[in-house]
Image (cartoon, rainbow, N blue to C red):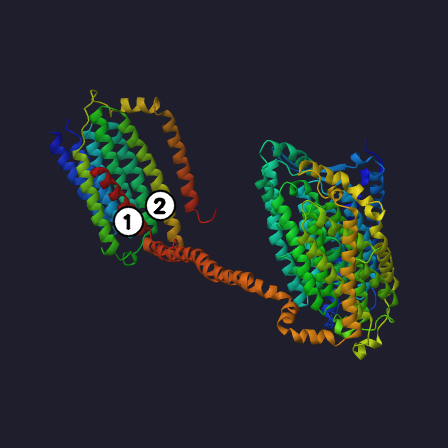
Amino acid sequence: MVTGILDYIWLVPALPLLGVLLNGAIALFCERPLLLAEAAHGDEGHGHGDAHGGHHAPAPYRKLVAFIGPAVVGAAFVVSVLAVLALAARPAHDRFFVQVLFPWIQAGGFSAPAALQLDPLSSVMILVVTGVGFLIHVYSAGYMSHEKAFARYFVYLNLFTFAMLTLVLGSNYLVMFVGWEGVGLCSYLLIGYWYEKKSASDAGKKAFIVNRIGDFGFMLGVFLIFWTFGTVNYTEVFAKVPLLSANGVLTTEIATAITLLLFVGAIGKSAQIPLYVWLPDAMEGPTPVSALIHAATMVTAGVYMVARSSSLFLLSPVSMGVVATVGAATAIFSATIGITQNDIKRVLAYSTVSQLGYMFLACGVGAFTAGIFHLMTHAFFKALLFLGSGSVIHALSGEQDMRKMGSLKKHLPITFTTMFIATLAIAGIPGLSGFFSKDEILWKAFSSEHGHIALWAVAALAAGITAFYMFRLVFLTFFGESRMEPEVEKHVHESPYSMTVPLMLLAVLSVVGGWIGIPEVLKGHNYFEEWLAPVFAQGAAGGHGAAGAHGAAHHPVALELGLMAGSVAVALCGIGLAYYLYRVRTNKPKEIAEAVPGLYDVVLNKYYVDEIYDFLFVRRIVNGSIVLWQAFDAAFIDGIVNGIAAAVRGAGDGVRRLQTGVVGNYAFSLLLGAVLLVGYILTR
Amino acid sequence: MMEPTAYLLLSGILFGIGVAGVVARKNALIILMSVEIMLNAVNVAFIAVGSHLGDPTGSIFAFMVMTVAAAEAAVGLAILIAIYRLKETIDITELSVLKW
Amino acid sequence: MEPILFIIFGAIAVGGAIMVVTRKHPMSSALYLILTLFAVAALFVLRQAHFLAAIQVIVYAGAVMVLFIFVIMLINVPENKLPMERLTGLRLLGVVAAGFLILESAILARRFAMPAGSTADAGSVQAVGRALFTDYLLAFEITSVLLLAAVIGAIALAKRKI
């Protein structure tokens, strides 16, 4: 029945894997010996700034790596596009394709094949991952060109792409989990790419450990799914939902438990309250990594997973409420932190956390389509923002502090233009992608049956703050007077084409990316919602009737337009405020900060969440581990083991003296034994 | 014919003397001879009980013991000669290579 | 008649045995051992075990003891190089333990209670020969193998170079 390109869907994850193997071979057999030889010659390490490693003669393998790395992802993108086109050519109800690669885990009635599933949802994800991923790979080839461990970087990046594609293409929760862990591993490796730097390796560990907490919840959720449904395959699970909820096996409580556990996983991976702390620190990694993993793709895995499990989430109003509340809270919470940060990448990191909060808010109010829509547009403009900031950092020889930037507009015209477009998009200026997706979320937060006016208000406020801090970033970076170090200012240069071309392409996407989802009220056609409808329709059917998608019908058009205008107005207010504070009255921010020193310090220090966690959990665990290590393991366990060994040795030392070697003594023992034995027989 | 009790008593006494010789002496030759006494003591018991029961098996067993005793004496003495050649002594307390 | 002869020959056997284990020179021990063996052979005769009595004299007193004396004379340890022996420590304890063993065996002997058999000539050459070549033929043949092994072993051990 299935023919053509869809049968080659396995190529999508396989091509990046091929890249891993090729680049891995190069990294192991070409690069590593070189680096080791260099280290052996006592070559002083170059200052590992974000961009500038140092200058040495380029080895020939680097060109090959720079080709293979992006090429495999590009090829995967081409296959993805063809496959999605083939899928789109089918009638809407038939847009579903599963390719079983091999039976993976088979035990009794349990079966989890290694299978790929292409449906509208996963097709969106693979297009984003391979498309944005390809651009970032190309950008990386330029950005990382000064790095010594060039091949190692591309190995990790390709491995990440492979894992992410596995995550989104898997046809059951276990395959998803493999990808889930894979991206976590790659995240760790890439954050700690400059592992010689302690802060980088610490950040990598932090990301990994915090993610583990989420993964724990995710695993428990999957176990509970298996316990309830007897399977972990998406199609079987979701097909069983109506039946099991009808016969009382799948109660609301169980659904709540499952979905909350899954959501714990999503919280960890997608950096929501309370597990968001790793994402800002993840900025220790190279900037393209931040763009790809910590903005565009990996962190959206949680949103994807929640959307994928929409039929389960819709069964539990409690979970929906939790998801929406956590999303909204994260959105506003991290947005406020974003106001005060001075590190350009950290602002973007908190912005990412905030935008992820939006996506969860959308999922929580039942507007999964809107959530995925925002996921996509966010991938475009946030990747652009990160890459743009990378370009700025590259130009400034590794400077990341916005207080030492300014007036870069004339030096970096392409970077400025593209970043400005992205800023407009994230701020929600009408016509750009961010507007459509964000506005749809706001509207659904208000109008959906799961929504609430408070959620809308929080989200709208967060949108205003977003506009404010993003324009603060732009104004501080590109406008005003130069605050650069003189030495740095001499070297300012626009980035090479390998970096600017991806920026331009992403800028185009940031503009037009939203046009596939123009709401009806603006006389547009929401192709995106139509495209995803088959995926979420089944969820709606199994849950509490039509959610999200049809909620709009109950509200007048004027209200929707009014709210839209309101959110735009809020965004414009944010922009205006930023303009006022950072262009007109540039002393004002300092005055405000001094006026409320307590509050400012609290926000600047990220509400002391890291310190609180450190006090509450990290130190407890570290101290407990030390006790366990020294008192329990070293003293008690080792004491038992060594004690037994010492006792045996001591006993042997004593007993061996019985072996005199004199035969007479042995004969005496024999005699004694005989006497005692006969005596025993006699007395018996 | 007498009850075998007295013979068994005699057998025990002879055996005990043999044992005492084995344990108390250092001279390997005398130890070997003490072993012969022990074997003979056993033979006395076999023969006494065998004739009491009217069963030739007692004699057969004593016969087997004698054969083994002959073999043992041959091999034991051969070992003794070998040791004497090596160590110039027949004092078994000086042959303590089986030590710790 | 039997009790008197038993006491006489039993006393000779015990006395000989005591002399064997107490003599300093092995040659004296060997000669006393021959005395003991003859006394035991006499006891065998008392128990109507004529065949075993004959074997005892021929094989034991004849062959084995000749072997012993042969070796004693071959090694010929001079008087002053014989081991210095004192009954101390473990040796004394060993003798005491041997005494206990005798005591125990005496108790065991007193407990002996088995009905006497009918046939009187169980130890005759005829009876033993019959048993040896019918019921115990295999054991008898294996005995020959054992002796062969002992002969080869003795040769191998006693040779200077193999």
Tag 2, which secondary structure?
helix
Residue C21 vertical position relative to residue A382 in the rendered view, above or below: above
Marks 2 and 1 share the same chain:
no
Tag 1, which secondary structure?
helix
Percent from the top left, x then y, of residue A334?
A: 68, 61
Given residues A26 and A4, the one toward you in this image is A4
Residue C6 sits in quarter: top left
Residue A583 sits in quarter: bottom right
Is residue B78 visible in the rendered structure shown here? yes
Q: Quadrant of the C terminus of chain A?
A: top left
Residue A229 vertical position relative to residue A18 in the rendered view, above or below: above
Residue receiving disc 1? A668
The answer for which chain carries disc 2 is B
Percent from the top left, x then y, of residue A156?
A: 74, 56
A206 left or right of A392 in image? left
Q: For marks 2 and 1, give the CA distance.
A: 22 Å
Residue receiving disc 2? B77
Instruction: Report the residue that reaches farthest toward the bottom.
Output: A486
Instruction: Report the residue that reaches farthest toward the top.
Output: C118
A306 left or right of A473 in image? left
Q: Which mark is residue A560?
A: none
- Label 1: how many residues lie within 10 Å, few (<14), some (14-19) or many (20+)? many
